[in-house]
Amino acid sequence: MTIWTQKSIELANQRDYLDQLYRVYPMANNLKRELADGVVAELHSKFSLQDNAALLNLLLQQDLFPIKDSYVAYLRRDKTAINRNPATVNRIAGMLYELGFDEMINLMSKPKETNRQIGPLFRNWIKRNSLGAVLATDAETFLRSQENAVLDLDDTALMQFARQHLGYSRNKGLDFVAKFNGNFVVGEAKFLTDFGGHQNAQFEDALQTLRTKFDTQQPIIPIAILDGVLYIKGSNKLHTTITNLHEEIVISSLLLRDFLYSI
């Protein structure tokens, strides 16, 4: 493995890794979702009258539907289906009445899942100029800059830039595009919070970007900016994979600045 992957493993196992990582990925307290003013009273009215269609219409306008049902997503995308499918509406409404009004409201107020909060945090850290480079908010400024620079755009715009100027071939957004000492550095950033399932898929996705071929003469350095459980020593798939890499650069965000200025 590269020295940067080795340094990342050492950092995670020998120092206050999690305390430092909180600067990049500050987890907010999972506060309950707030329902808009008047919504609870309106829901109570529809619930009390057992106006099934009106109740579902109002519930589908809220951020979180109180129950898991495979038909809810369809109704959310096609509200006219409510009037055309009374048996489905009555079945779902019956489940809501069985819950009771207070429990229905409680379920609608559940906090957002932590994983859904993580996405923007790396970009917010970049926006705080944590890397000490020029933050360019448009492609032309970035390309013209004679200084070290980071392109400050969303993942889709970064993908489009990389396709147009760097020969990037994946149909997948990017989290990081920078230019240091004439080299373009391109990668994804992920905080892997556990082993298995979705987290393993996120890891594999980052490796796919890391191994992507760029159809350009420009000097490109692809990296995977990964943090979390993959640095825990053991026989788990994530750690085994990174310790068997050769040229590919897997690096903690905490070492990203040092890496960039070493190029």
Image (cartoon, rainbow, N blue to C red):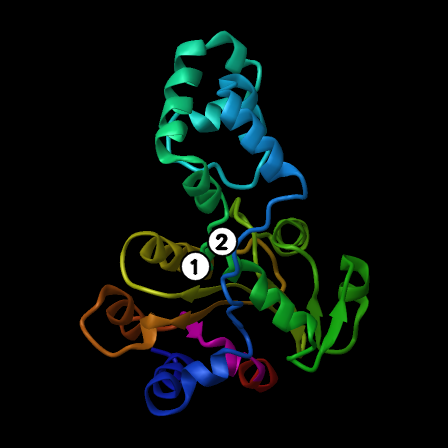
Residue 183 image-quadrant placement: bottom right
> Range of the magenta residues?
248-257
If the image is split into quadrants, where does the N terminus sit?
bottom left
**Nearest the camera: 98 or 109?**
98
Closer to the chain start, of discs 1 and 2, is 2
x and y percent of residue 157 in the render? 67, 51
Residue 71 image-quadrant placement: top left
- Disc number placed over residue 80 in the picture, else none: none
Q: Give the side of residue 230 with respect to residue 124, left or right.
A: left
Q: How many marks?
A: 2
Q: Give the side of residue 115 with respect to residue 194, left or right.
A: right
Q: Verify whether residue 256 appears in magenta.
A: yes
Residue 186 image-quadrant placement: bottom right
Residue 214 visible from this viewpoint? yes
**Nearest the camera: 239 or 197?**
197
Q: Amino acid at mark 2?
A: Lys
**Nearest the camera: 24 or 203?**
24
x and y percent of residue 198 in the render? 35, 52
Q: Give the side of residue 175 with respect to residue 205, left or right.
A: right
Question: Element type at marker 2?
Answer: loop
**Which residue is under mark 2?**
112
The CA span between labels 1 and 2 is 24 Å
Residue 76 visible from this viewpoint? no
**Nearest the camera: 181 or 251?**
251
If the image is split into quadrants, where does the C terminus sit?
bottom right
Vertical placement of 167 versus 127: above or below?
above
**Which residue is under mark 1?**
206
Vertical placement of 198 versus 255: above or below?
above
Classed neighbour count for the residue bearing mark 1: other residues with Cα under 10 Å, few (<14), some (14–19), many (≥20): many
